Amino acid sequence: MTKRARSLLQIPQGTEGFYLEEAYRHRKLTAQIEHTMYNWGYLPVQTPVFDFFDVYEPFFTGSDERRIYRLIDREGDLLLLRSDITLFLARQMGMVLTDEDLPTRVCYFDTILRHQDAEDISKNEFFQAGAELIGLPGVDGDLEIILLMQEVLSQLPLPAHRCHIGSRAIADAALSSLPAAEQTRARRLIAMRDRAGLKRSLRAGSFEVRRADYLCDLFGLIGERNDLERVRAAGAKQSFIDEPTERELERLSLIFWQLGELGLAEGTRVDLSEIGAQPYYTGTVFQVYMDGQDSSVASGGRYDKLLDAFGFSAPSVGFSTMLRRIENALTEPSIYNPSREPETVSGQTFVDRYRSATAIRASGRSAIL
Amino acid sequence: MISNALTIALPKGRLLDRFQEHLAACGIRIAFEDRKLIAEDDSNTLRAFLVKNTDLPVYVHHGIAGLGVCGRDVLYESGYDFFRLLKFTFGSTRMCLATKREQADRAVPGHLTVATKYTRFARDYFQTRGIPVEIIRLNGSVELAPLLGLAPYIVDLVETGSTLKANNLTVVEELEKIGVYLIANPAYYKFNYRRVDTLVSLLGQRDVEIEDTGATVGKID
């Protein structure tokens, strides 16, 4: 085999192309999601594929920074390939929005690029579909985004899935007495559901033993609204919850109460170990877990301070879905196949064939020359 | 018929027998037929895959198996994030720094050269303590390295110390106790948390102390 032939067979780790029927299904699925988002009044936005790195640098933590792709342009500026649409979108919206524009509803269908480990079978290029609601604070905004995401997913033939809803704000409020580094450590222990480590961390941070135990129970909670209420009542009774934490618990409870009123609580779970994987989250956060999937298929939350960093102050909440993960999980992918084979027209000359094909296409069918 | 059993990856080797005994004591019997690598217990609680120890985190990370039984040494080297649901009382061992017996009394130098299979652990352990370290990666028979002059020190798992002793080596320092854990793919746990929690209750105590030496590089800020 020649060197050229060998090089043509090699594919950079993590890249992915998909073709023909598979690409058709991808487009059709995207169109269906787009349609839902347009019905909810969300308009599309397109973010640039790269931007200056230093604009986003404050938002990258150690592990995230290792996963982003950087390049240097001809002027020597360090650029960043789009690794997080929410960040790129915040930068764009921060430049163009005014107070009169609020609330603004936007949606996107785009790719992000993040490096995965060499042995990782997932891809570096992720197709995301998502939506953001800018300028609507509070529970109403949270609910709108959660319900839009639920509607998008419910319209697809997918295996059983559950939306786990938690709150970054509850964790931030409950841990606020700890030094910043200890807060970071405790948040990680919460997210990893490391009860013993969290207990030790809180006790080391001067939390009284019984209160530390209670907070471990609180952040270990997965269940329904009545489970949240039970733990909340126990905390209030023994004065383990301060006023800011109670306020955030009330807010989360209100979300679940309204989901219940709408008859939509069944697909959701309270999960206080959900605190948001990105540092910019400030409030309600959620992830969707699906039977048979090795990671969440959709996620999102509230980030009320993010646009401030890009020159415009407005509360925001949004979600994104991992489209390729969803496509691979479809229980009936064939419904997104091309509806029928195109007809091959016959005729003596190209002109004859072209005219026949035009007539067939005018009747709404597909024809190839 | 689609199995509703929880999926679990089990390591070939020393831990398998111990875990099967532990399971049996809890009323779950899993037996792998001759040369078969997949088995299910009679009560349809667990569907088990027999995998190479070092491959186990890969299977769990990708959700092929939702759960796994794995030593902290292997978890650390994988770098993946898992929920650690239970620390078993069996299978514990020690990660140690060892050298030739005649060199053991000398002070450990400020700059270390160590041969090891556990490169990630060794690098992180010494670097977080401000000790410059040169790592030579080996895949087995690490005890040979000091004897043949490849590296003066090794970092390796020590159970009884008999292999070290047979090769005229000795432990200089115990770096960390290495426990055996029931681990879970986080997304698998979240979706199946009720059934997994039931299994965890069955298998043993719930509280697991997780040593904080950075085995799972943080996704959370």
Image (tube, rainbow, N blue to C red):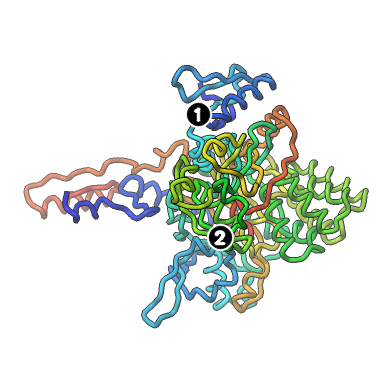
Residue drawn where x is 63% and y is 77% of the image: A312
Residue in the image at 19% along x and 56% along y: A4
Q: On what subunit does the disc labeled 1 rest? A: B
Q: Are marks 1 and 2 on the same chain?
A: no
Based on the displayed image, in which of its 4 quarters is residue A345 positioned?
Answer: top left
Marks 1 and 2, how far apart at CA: 31 Å
Residue A63's disc number:
2
Q: Residue furthest left?
A: A348
Which SS class for mark 1?
Answer: strand
Which of the 4 image quadrants contains residue A332? top left
Q: Amino acid at mark 1?
A: Leu
The residue identified by callout 1 is B50
Instruction: Identify the subunit bearing mark 2.
Output: A
| Front: mark 1 or 2 | 1
| B63 in relation to A191, above or below | above
Q: Nearer the viewer, residue A309 or A216?
A: A216
Q: Is residue B59 visible?
A: no
- Left or right: A118 as drawn, with respect to A253: left
Q: Position of residue B102 (x, y in %)?
A: 57, 48
Q: Which mark is residue B116?
A: none
Q: Position of residue A112 (x, y in %)?
A: 46, 60
- In the depicted view, which residue is nearer to us: B12 or A311? B12
